[in-house]
Image: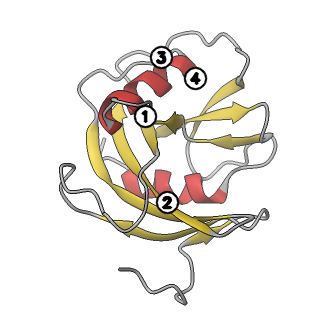
Amino acid sequence: MPDQTARPLAADDRGNALTAFIRRAEEQPPGDAPLPLALVALWNGDRVLMVFDRFRQGWELPGGLIEPGESPRRAAARELLEESGQTPGEPLRFVGYPRFRLAPDQRVEYGALFSGRCAEAVAFRPNEEIEAIWWWDLREALPGRVQPLDAHLARLTRLPL
């Protein structure tokens, strides 16, 4: 179990923190906290897909809650398509389990992080949840607030070209 007093890998201005990143088999999720969400780092060349969430008013990786009876892998693919209209050119690659400490109650939970390559970027249509997408090279400034937890996770998934 990760050290609760260790400095987080990343933190945001709302009191949320990425406290650990656990690389293990997809079939062996950590059992010390819930696993309610799945995230995707989709790459197009040397740029990763970020979505602008209307409610949180910031750029983040596509992803969301795992529905009852749904696998984390299926949730990741569904959320990617729902939020951005994009699909990977090949099956998503499982990367690991990020461990979060979330405000305001400091609850601990895990996500399942997947990565993949975009075969061909398609035009984006804004929806109720997502206002815009951006293919980010991790160095340029994005217009608006970037979720530092997601930016850190994107860096962990960078694939060779």
3D distance between C-alphas at marks 4 and 3: 14 Å
In the rendering, at what x and y percent does residue 155 appear? 46, 56
Amino acid at pointer 3? Ala
SS under mark 3: loop
Which mark, residue 121? 3
SS under mark 4: helix
In the rendering, at what x and y percent does residue 53 appear? 72, 34
Q: Considering only vertical position in the picture, is 119 above or below 100? A: above
Disc 4 designates what residue? 83
Q: Are marks 1 and 3 in contact (CB under 8 Å)?
A: no
Instruction: Count neighbours of disc 4 (C-alpha within 10 A) and say few if under 14, some if 14 to 19, many if 20 or more.
Output: many
3D distance between C-alphas at marks 1 and 3: 10 Å
Disc 2 designates what residue? 109
- Nearer mark to the viewer, of 4 and 3: 4
Q: Are marks 3 and 2 in contact (CB under 8 Å)?
A: no
Q: Does label 4 or label 1 sit earlier along the sequence?
A: 1
Q: Name the side, left or right, on which 24 lies relative to 136.
A: left
- Residue beneath the point at 70% across and 24% down: 129
Q: Does label 3 or label 2 sit earlier along the sequence?
A: 2
3D distance between C-alphas at marks 2 and 4: 22 Å
